[in-house]
Amino acid sequence: MKTLFTFTLILFATTLFAQKVTSDYDKDTDFSGYKTYQFLGWQNDSDEIMNDLDKNRLRDAFKAEMDARNMVLSENGDMAISLFIVVDHKTSTTAYSNYYGGSNYRYRRGGSHWGGGYATTTYTENDYLEGTLVMDVFDAESKEQIWQAVAKGTIKEKPEKRAKSIPKTVGKLMKKFPIPKAK
């Protein structure tokens, strides 16, 4: 029972804290001049590993984030965006030890005695998918990269959970975007 509880707790903590987002941008770029954007597509056809439903979820989440910043999607936008995704198969290993101890040090006639005991360790392996989503933003005229964000986290297996987690992930990815959301 303790093993199941410990495993559940670790799995919950991993799901809760698994997502990591980093971003970087060109500090010399004045982002206030950008009003439109274009979507360049997926780099290296990395979208082929996703189904159409998840592609649409990602597209809609990015569009919602850009709409919230009053950015307009255009075929000839002044900002160009490309996406890249990588999915890795991972395995996590959890170990839990139980100690069934004997007695402590005892004094007996004729000498001393340490009580014996034993321990058992249970190992549990969990296979999961880790996804990395990269968003690259370029100045459409100069073709120079001006911003990049990377989100890494565990991919939810159930479609209804992905439907909820994809917009949250994109929201976290866009949190430090240099163009703030309109009020």
Image (cartoon, rainbow, N blue to C red):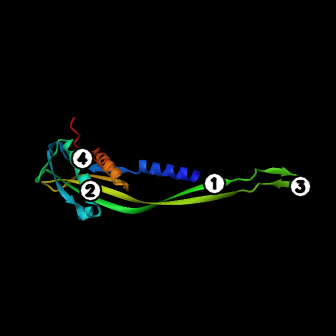
Asked which secondary structure carries label 2, the reply is helix
Q: Distance between the residues labelled 4 and 2?
A: 36 Å
Residue 110's disc is 3
Asked which secondary structure carries label 1, the reply is strand
Looking at the image, is 130 positioned above or below residue 21? below
First reached walking from the N terminus: tag 2 or tag 1? 2
Q: Nearer the viewer, mark 4 or mark 1?
A: 1
Q: Mark 1 points at which residue?
A: 98
Q: Name the residue under label 4.
A: 27
Q: Nearer the viewer, mark 3 or mark 1?
A: 1
Q: How crowded is mark 4: few (under 14 residues within 10 Å), some or many (20 or more)?
A: few
Q: Which amino acid does label 2 sit on?
A: Leu
Q: What residue type is labelled 1?
A: Asn
Residue 107 on image: x %, y %: 84, 50
Q: Name the residue under label 2.
A: 53
Q: What residue type is labelled 4?
A: Lys
Q: How crowded is mark 1: few (under 14 residues within 10 Å), some or many (20 or more)?
A: few
